Image: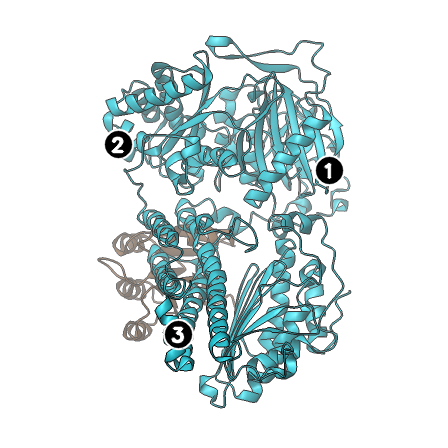
Chain colours: A cyan, B brown
Amino acid sequence: MKKPFFRRLKEVFAPGQTEASSDLTTHFRDFQAVLDGNNRALEAMTEMGEKLGGEYLFDVNYTRSAYATLFSAISGALDHFNLLTDGQYPQLAGTLARIDTLVQRMLRGGASLSSPLVVFYPEITWDQAEEVGGKNYHLAELANALHLRIPHAFAITTTAFTVFLHHNGLEARLAALAEADTATLAEVRTAILAGGFPEDFSAALGAALEKLRDRLGHNATLAVRSSAEEEDGEYSFAGQFETRLNVPCTVEAVQSAYKEVVASLFQANATSYQRQLGYDLGTLKMAVGCVAMIDAKASGVIYTAAAGKDRSRMAISAAWGLGPGVVDGLTDADLYTVAKEEMLRVVERRIGAKARMVVNLGGSGIATVETPAEQRPLACLSEPQVLELGRQALAIEKYYKGPQDIEWAMDAQDRCYLLQARALRVEDPAETPASADTSAATGYPVLLRDQGIVVQRGATAGTVFILQHLDELEKIPKGSILVAKHDSPHFVQAIPILHAIITDIGVPTSHMASICREFNIPTVVNTGSATSVLRHGQAITLQAGEGSEVVVYEGIVQSLLREERQTAAKLRELYEFRRQKYIMRYIAPLHLVNSLEQEFTPEKCKTVHDLVRFMHEKAVQALVANAEGQGRGFHRFFGTKTAVHRLALPIPVQMLVIDLGGGLRSTTGRKAPGFDEVASVPLRAVLAGMLAPGVWQNEGVPLRGADLLSGMTRAADVPGGAAIMENVALASSEYVNMSLRFGYHFNMLDCYCSDTPRNNHIYFRFVGGAAAITNRSRRIQLMAQVLAEQGFALKAKGDLLVGRLSGLNRQEIEGILNQLGRLIGFTRQLDARLDSDEMVTILARRFVQGDYRITP
Amino acid sequence: MAKHSIMVIDDEKIVGDMAKLSFEQDGYEVETFLNGESALERLKERRFDVVVTDLKMKGVDGLEVLRTVKKLYPGVKVIMITAFANLDVAIEALRDDVHDFFPKPVKIKELKASVKRALGEE
């Protein structure tokens, strides 16, 4: 932002002071407008997050008006940001427009018809999640964003789906499906299977297949898989739709597979799943993925958080042959447990029997066969292979900021490919019931104890139904406990009436397992003997705890039965509720955290939150650059001192102060100004608090286990006590605007403190942290407790806290700022210490009494 | 003890659905209606212990529901929820003996507490 030469000349000849300061004033006004818009956007965001979170009844009018408020705030901020930065970041307007289009589309509930019919994975962009469906989207992202190895693939979009329905006159039939019976659904499936394809569809598909054949050779075959709108989103739809494997790379073959996949939207298990999720049948749109087949020597699944709540270990299952062996629970797979320490470590290796395997039959599909005897006892993966998979899985978990369920396959050359990644539903510690008192069950005969693997915890009772054949699923009476030899994704049909599922064989990583977790159905797999020990019609009570803490009692042990499922968990089953909540995914997630990273670019902004963060950072920088530039100008031409100063403080914080007038007293000589030179009333007050004895915790607090993991999702670690050059205070005699960043959290303070109380205000915002979210929100609770006592009006959500206060007199504001300064210093590394809610209360009380020790 | 029954009327499905889930969780029996007309029909057939209704709906609105309830079942309490908090309407509703009046979005906890009060449980 170099100034044109004539303007510099003007500065020499005209009274420089006025010209320059008016320039600074304009910039400063833009800067304030950016911050103001950002603040309002953040507040609107927080408010929406709260109202759409499940604790409020809301309607679409609310969502619309709340979003309108948010949009006007952020676009206002963007206008001023563009002025401030001389239009240096034109991409941001485009990003905001795309976000707006996506949100508006969701508010209207319709998809666009402008997207292409076919998209190759490398071309899939961040805003195409709905068009290519969740499964395509996430798999493409693994390659596009994380550069992990996936097979060559393309997506047939939801637009193509609409085109297909339209071509076959099926739209009206689908629209009338809401209450359809089994016969009608069968008719619809038949009509889809008999459907034809419009010319443009066939042409687009033909071109895509040709491209694949060019790349992979003529013998290449494809996996044709479903990728419905919400698939792998909030709900997994695990195993609910058809997948066709080994499909030849020809238009006819792929079209026929496409129709089978699409028709599976209306098969019994899938319709029952959709109904449970609150869909009106016929409204769900399906994209399809065409993925080059990997002729897998072995394949399996990775859960980056092992069963139960143990997030420090991951579980990798593996079996010979193609994927269905593991995900359909057909075989007793190998199970590797890996500790997620700094260096990954295999802590347990259980070699499964692997009696059966799924193999590729060349041109004629796949088959399940007996595993050759000599292959059964062999481990599918070597230790280095397990660790390599583990590393990739960890990268994915880090990227999505949560546990993942990942499918993989290894080819004959031992190359590993990722085939799928989706969020793994793990219990929220807050929703976990306290373990029941087993003494209550004294006197009841124990039928099974500590056998099998717990997939979903819980205590429940019911009548045993031993399933011999899938056809019997329809006959299961309400309140049964389903006991079966193998697990199957088809069990989902019965889930609304089941109290629990117990199987002889199975792994906790199957499709059925995912679904049982989603619906909170207590489930135990791999007990070995449930079907022989339990009798059909017997009344039993199942208590499933951590790992393999399983007890089955004969009879109904009332005292063990826990309360019904949580409301929040049930609310997720309302489609409309989820749809409105989905809007938040274009608003709330923060991808840009560390401004020192290369990724901190306008191109990486994907959400409103990213825009806010990016603008804030760059606005501060622009203002500093501008003020520094002017300062140099003054210095050169008039010998006037610069407006930007580095403050020398006795604590490891580097802070730039931009003096807007009366913010600093003149210093003698070349010495950097210190606390004594700060003349700005509010800056002085808050610094006095930060410098108060005992407040500044200098010992580094080590981050542990879960902290480290979630810390890694942010950026390289920042050693305790190290200074970071991102702290800026804009100060005049009565005003301060301060941005402070310590490690992974941000403090923002905006304060006017004059002799006119009605002009005075404090705005304080705190966000982020490196520890686990529970600890981070505990820190927020602590701060909220302290600030509430100071009279702040507060809004808190997760790790974000916003406080406001106004209309107090100068002395009162100064006192509060002093306390706030203490709080800023005190809470710097506190989150890692807050292991319990009690600590929050204890430390808050201590803080108020002036005791700043953070040890228990 | 027989379950208490709640009638929920709102022209947006999500409100009824969420209310139904939340109240059923607490052991109430809930019926939901998407417009005032169908609700009035149902009221001719049976009594509910509490009625929760949206104010602004096409056709039969919340005030009309309120009056009908008071006519048919004078003792039954009516709770009004509305996106458009309008003082005049609030006063009119109060005159017609509305039990409670909430702006939308309404916190489910508060609505539940209000229902409890309406039933004399608190």
Counting from the top left corner in percent of width and height, residue A91 is at 38, 51
**Residue at which label 3 appears:** A23
Left or right, residue A35 beside residue A442: left
Residue A738 got which mark? none
Front tag of 3 and 2? 3
Marks 1 and 2 belong to one chain: yes
Left or right, residue A510 beside residue A474: right
Front tag of 1 and 3? 3
Query: At label 3, which amino acid type do we have?
Result: Asp
The mark nearer the N terminus, 1 or 2, is 2
**Residue at which label 1 appears:** A549
How far is the residue under mark 1 from the one under mark 2?
A: 50 Å
Label 3: which secondary element: helix
The mark nearer the N terminus, 1 or 3, is 3
Based on the displayed image, in which of its 4 quarters is residue A343 positioned? top right
How far is the residue under mark 3 from the one under mark 2?
A: 61 Å
Counting from the top left corner in percent of width and height, residue A556 is at 66, 39
Based on the displayed image, in which of its 4 quarters is residue A851 positioned? bottom right
